[in-house]
Amino acid sequence: MTAGNRSEIEQILREAGDCEPELDSRILTEELDGEALDEAVRRRASGEPLAYILGHRHFYREDYKVRPGVLIPRADSEVLVEAGLQYLGCLEMALGDVSKITSSGVSGAVRFADLCTGTGCIGISLANEVIRHGRDISGVLTDISDTALKTAEENVTDCSVKQGILQVIRHDILTVDLTGGYDLIVSNPPYVTDAEMKQLDREVSGYEPHLALEAGEDGLRFYKTIFPRAYNALTDRGAVMVEHGCLQGEQVRRLCEETGFKRIITLKDYGGNDRVTAGFKDAG
């Protein structure tokens, strides 16, 4: 196969069942040429995600390194970043449901944790914006995947606006407690149910790591552990914020409330779907 021009590439991708052949063709031809382009078109036509082929994905304000074996950043997760920034008083303009998050009133340096960090995009984006607002912040990015840890470390080096404030550590949230003293804990954990795993698009089920997706029969395995561990690790005015599936809002709120969190709220993403639930240790 030789990818001669954009129209030919679009036709190849269309015949392979690609849902956005025009967009993929434009991106591929802008970034690659020659044999590299031919190989990329072949991989894309087989269903491999574009981010893995190119090795990067834009998220929030940065461009993050991505590789097979680590979950690809999604735009929906930016709501989690914005919710955290709103809570810390570091968001220029809160849109949609994010405006419902009230500021923590926490002054001085901020300490946070990003659990199940993957590429590190959520934690790094959060820290970068806090630094851009003239605040001090430090944080830990945790995961159990070797690929994720390596990718997050590289992204911390390449994408952080200030070095030395983020630490990438191996940590299994399902079995090991968190250390204390965090003002904010964020997480985009696995939340796909067993039934949903069987219905995922081939781009996801065939290429993205099941370790970052599977969460048991009800998809709630991680929240049942994250909430109590987060509660014990947060400061008195701390907050936990988690991403979840669009049908899981009510169940996640219930688990959060049962743990002892107050003022629990679920935020919709910009597609109108339940996406992030936040809970606070203080009653406001």
Image: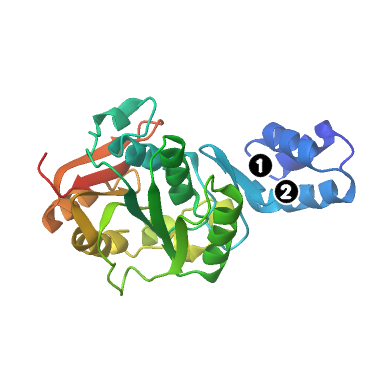
Splitting the image into 4 quarters, where does residue 224 fall?
Answer: bottom left
Q: Are marks 1 and 2 in contact (CB under 8 Å)?
A: yes
Q: Whole-percent x and y of residue 231? A: 19, 58
Amino acid carrying mark 2 in the image: Ala
Q: Residue at x 78, y 36 (%)?
A: 30
Secondary structure state at the residue bearing disc 1: loop
Amino acid carrying mark 1 in the image: Asp
Of callouts 1 and 2, the N-terminal one: 1
Splitting the image into 4 quarters, where does residue 17 fall?
Answer: top right
**158 or 268, which lies in front?**
158
Secondary structure state at the residue bearing disc 2: helix
State the separation of the CA atoms marked 1 and 2.
7 Å
Q: Among all residues in the image, which is located at the extreme bottom?
A: 175
Q: Is residue 206 visible?
A: no
| Residue linked to disc 2 | 45
Q: How many marks?
A: 2
Q: Is residue 15 visible?
A: yes
- Mark 1 nearby-residue class (10 Å; few <14, some 14–19, many ≥20): some
- Mark 2 nearby-residue class (10 Å; few <14, some 14–19, many ≥20): many
Left or right of 69 in this view: 256 = left
